[in-house]
Amino acid sequence: MHRKVLIDWFTTAKGQILKKQEAAYLTRSITASCKQVILQVGALGWENKFIDCSLYKQFYVLDDEQFSWPASKLLRGANTALPLQSDSVDMIILPHLLEFDEDKHQVLREVERILKPEGKLIILSFNPWNIYINLQYLMRKEKGAPWLPSLVSRTKIEDWLRLLNFEVEVAAGFDFDASRTSTVDAEQRKNDIRVAAYAIKAIKRRYHIIPLTPVKKYQSKLAMARIIDMPYRQKEYDKNS
């Protein structure tokens, strides 16, 4: 399934429901200030549903083929070699990107490289255990595409992030129930195996190694006098003499 197929799928009835839930989650999860740099890797075309591009002047969308919402700043580049300096981005959003990239580990390594220490990462991805999602892939996959979709479970991505010194802050799950738009409700469904998609929010930690130096042998400068406990009879003799 090509990413263009994903964008077209979001126009279907079920796609619209999932879009509404994910947009509500992103709106609440974007906590960066208006002056900070936010990068979205992978265009959706409906970025206006979760971010005000006129308010966030440093919001960029990077994609090598698709187009984002016209008000956002579009960059062209490869996912595995992001054209940005190291430690230069405050927040990164990966909306259904890892499903369509063969080198997922390299994408995450690049994300870790350009993200500032204590910067935040938000990942949206489809649930590999959802039957409907897999059927949609088989119905829409392009000629020559793999027989099974390249979907990854939430727990596996969380393990990958921990290896890159990310701390997973929160996770959420989304389904096709149109009445569910609450972020709190989505977080409660994170472990539901039936969800159609999930979200992960993580923080990049920068741990500093403190070198250990040999400890010098401690020698006390004070000499303690030895206390001799004399027998009781000796004490009485000294007292009466």
Image (tube, rainbow, N blue to C red):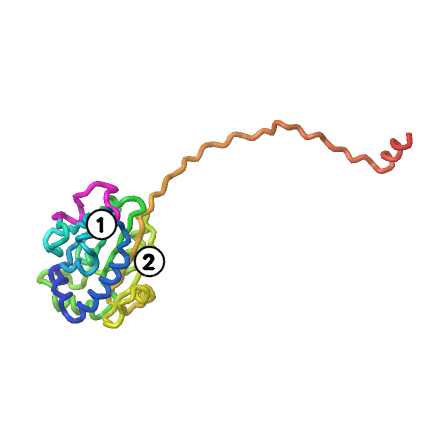
Foreground: 119 or 108? 119
Mark 1 vs mark 2, CA separation in Å: 19 Å
Is-magenta flag for residue 136? no
Image point (11%, 55%), residue name: 70
Image point (31%, 53%), residue name: 202
Instruction: Where is residue 42? Give x, y as percent.
Output: 16, 54
Instruction: Where is residue 79? Give x, y as percent.
Output: 17, 49
Amino acid beneath label 1:
Ile
**Is 43 displayed left or right of 192 in the figure?**
left
Does residue 43 sit above or below 184 in this rendering? above
Q: Name the residue under label 2.
A: 170
**Is 50 displayed left or right of 202 in the figure?**
left
Q: Is mark 1 on a helix, strand or loop?
A: strand
Instruction: Where is residue 104? Give x, y as percent.
Output: 22, 52
> Between tags 1 and 2, which lies in front?
1
Which residue, as the protein is rendered here, is positioned at the far right?
241
Give the mark, 1 or 2, whose residue is nearer the N terminus.
Answer: 1
Residue 190 visible, this orientation:
no
- Which quadrant: the N terminus? bottom left
Provide the major secondary structure of the magenta segment. loop
The disc at residue 38 is: 1
Crowding at dot 1, Cα within 10 Å, few <14 / some 14-19 / many 20+, comes out as: many
